[in-house]
Amino acid sequence: MNGTCTAADAVYAYNLNGNCYLNLTNRCSLRCRFCPKFNGQWDVRGYGLRLHGEPDVDTLMSEVENQPEACDEVVFCGLGEPTLRLGTVLETGRRLRERGYRVRLNTDGLSNYVYGRDLLPRLAESVDAISVSLNAQTAAVYAVNCRPKTPDAYAAVLDFLYRAPDVVPDVTATAVAGLPGVDMDACAEIADKIGVGFRRRELGHVG
């Protein structure tokens, strides 16, 4: 599956590292400098993830169940922020868990800020794990690399990370090594103080 997808061959689900990733939307609440799509690249390891329409719950369920390889985990990810399709995430996650799948949400951690309320209790009913893109040890570094629409965004991500472990059993903060000004040790220390896991990601390696 190479190249930019059309409406007829859109990639809604793809298998990487034994996990099934779901591509719900190309819309984002950030404009990260390092995101492939903001650099004119829609391919992720052979999968064209540009969407010309957003899949509904039934389509996503069918895509998961028809994957050619078994998956250890189903991950809401893709080249966009999954929680911008909150209802789809909640219903798809609920159905997947009912069928015995482990479900993870990869997110920028801004959903509470975007929607103006604490969504974590609802997310906890639909996902087993949350991975949050921290990507900086200060608001200034975050602003340079993630280009949020508001200066309050970094504080909102930290607040999300503080709240998440109260309701979700598996929470991880991530940061991309190689971004200008990012101190990986400082990011790991922030995660440790909050009481969540930490994972180092490599620049240019998506998935």
Image (spheres, rainbow, N blue to C red):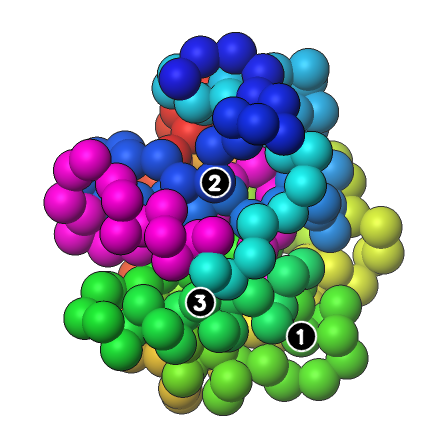
Asked if residue 52 is among those painted magenta in the image, a careful observer would answer no
**According to the image, label 3 marks what residue?**
92
| Above or below, 106 relative to 100 | above
Question: Does the rendering let one see residue 6?
Answer: yes
Q: Which residues are magenta?
A: 59-83
Residue at image coords 71%, 45%:
27
Question: Residue 197 is drawn in which quadrant?
Answer: bottom left
Residue 13 in the image: state x and y as whole percent: 40, 40
> Along the horizontal axis of the image, is 160 left or right of 26?
left
- Packing grade of label 1 (10 A; few <14, some 14-19, many >=20) is some
Separation of residues labelled 3 and 2 (CA atoms): 13 Å
Q: Residue furthest right?
A: 150
**According to the image, label 1 marks what residue?**
112
Nearer to me, 204 or 158: 204
Separation of residues labelled 1 and 2 (CA atoms): 25 Å
Q: Amino acid at mark 2?
A: Tyr
**According to the image, label 2 marks what residue?**
12
| Above or below, 8 relative to 71 | above
- Packing grade of label 2 (10 A; few <14, some 14-19, many >=20) is many
